[in-house]
Image (cartoon, rainbow, N blue to C red):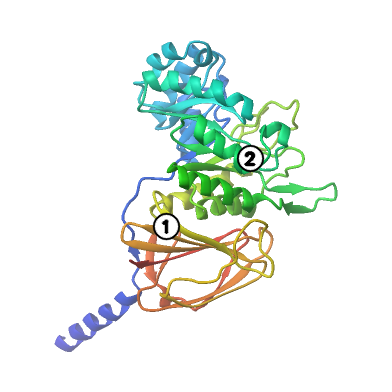
Amino acid sequence: MKYLFLFMNLMACSMGLFAQQKTNPAEQIPILAWYGVSPEASTVERYEELRQSGITHNFTFFNNEDELAVAMESAQKAGVRMIIHCPELATDPERIVQRFKDHPALAGYFLRDEPGRADFPALAKWARRIQAVDSEHFCYLNLLPNYASKEGLGTDTYREHVQLFIKEVPLQLLSFDHYPIVEDESGNRTMRAGFYENLEIFSDEARKAGKPFWAFALAVAHTPYPIPTPAEIRVQVYSNLAYGAQGIQYFTYWTPKPGTWDFHHAPIEYDTQKRTEIYDYITQMNSEIRGLSEVFLNAKVISVAHTGESIPHGTHRLEQLPDVITKFETEGTGAIVSVLNKGNVSYLVIVNRDFQKSMSVTIEGDERLKRVLKDGSTVDANAYISTLPVAPGDILVYSWPL
């Protein structure tokens, strides 16, 4: 028995080399439902349904402040934070802010969507009026993507548009939308050429300003945007996180009423108010975001580069990795390769840019290298073979101590 006991101890020690360890628990990356629970459906049950999908924040256009107040109570009971908007926030901001600023469900105040350059002075004045009453909660709006026209931007370049906004409008966090995957009349899906350049510019300007930024994934179909696949949602979310996004937003959660745009097939349908399969897609995605929040939340982006025979316009080709990595190769369309630092840990994030085909990654490193799994646990990298497949739009994450 003595020898059996010793043998089992030795086996346990050797197996410990490959044991999974949980990373430290982290606060979660915020996940926003943009056009969330409908005002007409502001029940606790509907907000609980939203929360069960993994969404943490809700933004909805309310018709008046009393309608908003009902939704705030439901959201609080369901554990959902609210970015609020009602017409009175524009006409009498001080009174509305005073009414809601101490509500436990309040996260921030929505100003408007996709302003042009000419709107910046009025937005700055509005934000300051809100902040004079409540400096604890953020003001929020969403900036245009780089495929907007010069007329829409009101500036000669996209970078100038972002720079001027940051300089003139005193918001605590920054946000932009870019919906990269489009479908032609033949059903062919492609990624807009400027998606990664948009991330390059926006993340760079946010970093220089010392402000966090949030970014989007499209969850509702409308021409020319198709009903999204899980891989199409995943490539948007993981690309945003690899560039340092500190919040993920879905446009939309509730399907807007069809009209100017042929909106259809969001996570919750407009007419039946029932779930589509997109609800399940975002629920899985949100579980992964939650599991990897320890990696991305409050991390500092050290570098972002790309691999592949050709790399996206406006990006940088990968030339060097930290010395903990002894071998690194990708096969396929190419990958985003991001290095992040957080506390006393460095992370290597690898995203398959291709949302239609798998790619393979060969990675080897010294004894410090760990693999971070999607639930946030870590295991010695050498517990796995050195060449692994990465599904369309998917991610691999590694870590090592600084």
Picture residue at 55% right of the left edge, 39% below the top: 163
Picture residue at 74% right of the left edge, 47% below the top: 182
The kind of residue on which mark 2 rests is Thr
Instruction: Name the image quarter holding the N terminus.
Output: bottom left
Q: Earlier in the sequence, mark 2 or mark 1?
A: 2
Which numbered disc covers residue 331? none
The kind of residue on which mark 1 rests is Asp
Residue marked by disc 1: 375
- Bin the neighbour count of mark 2 within 10 Å (Cα to Cα): few under 14, some 14-19, many 20 and up: few
Corner quadrant of residue 277: top right
Residue 242 can be seen, yes or no:
yes
Residue closer to the observer: 336 or 57? 336
Picture residue at 38% right of the left edge, 14% below the top: 98
- Bin the neighbour count of mark 1 within 10 Å (Cα to Cα): few under 14, some 14-19, many 20 and up: some
Residue closer to the observer: 70 or 314? 314
User: Percent position (x, y) of residue 294?
Assistant: 38, 53
User: Percent position (x, y) of residue 394?
Assistant: 57, 60
Residue 246 can be seen, yes or no:
no
Instruction: Name the image quarter holding the C terminus.
Output: bottom left
Above or below: residue 326 compared with residue 171: below
